[in-house]
Image (spheres, rainbow, N blue to C red):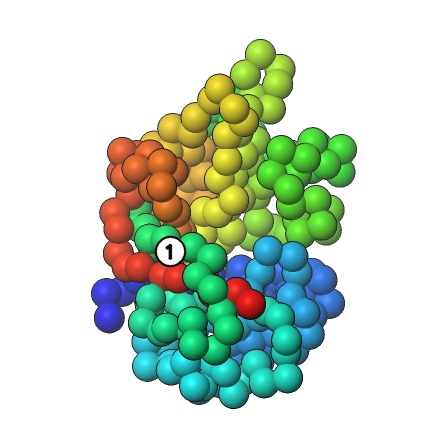
Amino acid sequence: MDPRLRSAVDASVGWYEDLCTLHGVGSVLSDGLWSALDPPPPLHSDAVAVEPEVTADRVLARLEGREHGGVKDSFAAMDLSGAGFGLLFSATWIHREAARPAASSEWSAVTTGPELAEWTSHHDTRDVLLPPLLRRAHFRILARRAGGHLVAGAVARLGSGTVDVSNVYAVPGHHVDWAELAAAVAVYFPDRPLVGYERGEPLTAARDGGFTPVGELRVWVR
C-alpha cells in the first residue's frame, strides 16, 4: 500500500477515536474494521474500513442489529447497495509534503468558546466540535478572518507523524487558498506531512495548493 494512503487512513481513524472519546462513545478495532460501540457523533460513520481486505459481509456482521448507520469504505472497494445502504458520497484521499511555516495575520487558532460557536455556526458542527477540543494540544481549530469577519475555517489534528486537515470551509464569496492553509498549519505542527480527503471544487483547490491524490474512498448510509 502507498504509505501516503496508509497515513491518511490511519489519521482518519485517529480522528474518529478522538471524537468518540470526546462524546463518551466507546469503540473497537479488530479484523481491520473500526466501529463505534454506540451511536457515533453527528456526521460520523458507525464503521470505518482500516484495511483493504475488509469485506461487505464483515461490515454487515459488525453492524448487525443497527437499523441506521454509516460506513466509511476507506478503499472504495465495497458495494453495500444490496444491504439497504445508499452511497452518500465518494471522495479522494490527499497528501502534501510538509509546508514551510508562514505566520498569517488572516489565519489564527480559535481559543475561546464564543469563537468556536461562531466557527461552528458557519459549518453545522456545533454538536460535533465541542469546547474541550480547545484544550487538546494535538488539535488546532483554525479560522481565517478578513475585515474582522470569519471567512474560512479548518481543523488540524496532529497524529503519528502526520497532520490530518479536515472540515475545511469558506463562507459564500470567499475561497480557501490551500497552500496558504498548509503554511498556517505548519506554524503549529512544523515539518509534518498533511493528509485528508476532499471532493469537488475543494479537491481541485487542494491540488492547486500542492496536495496529491493518493486513493479513493466512499461513505455509505442507511
Task: Identify which residue, 161 or 131, lies in the foreground.
Answer: 131
Task: Look at the image and tell me in which quarter the N terminus lies.
Answer: bottom left
Task: Identify which residue, 103 or 216, lies in the foreground.
Answer: 216
Q: Locate residue 14, reporting x and y percent.
A: 51, 64
Q: Is residue 105 above or below residue 208?
A: above
- Residue 181 located left or right of residue 170: left
Q: Residue at x 59, y 69 (%)?
A: 69
* Local crowd size for mark 1, using a 10 Å CA cut-off: few (<14), some (14–19), many (≥20): some
Q: Locate residue 124, reporting x and y percent.
A: 64, 42
Q: Is residue 130 above or below residue 28?
A: above
Task: Look at the image and tell me in which quarter the C terminus lies.
Answer: bottom right
- Residue 118 located left or right of residue 95: right
Q: Amino acid at mark 1?
A: Ser
Q: Secondary structure at mark 1?
A: strand
- Residue 85 located left or right of residue 43: left
Q: Quadrant of residue 10?
A: bottom left
- Residue labelled with disc 1: 90
Q: Is residue 80 visible?
A: yes
Q: Locate residue 161, reporting x and y percent.
A: 40, 58
Q: Residue at x 33, y 68 (%)?
A: 75
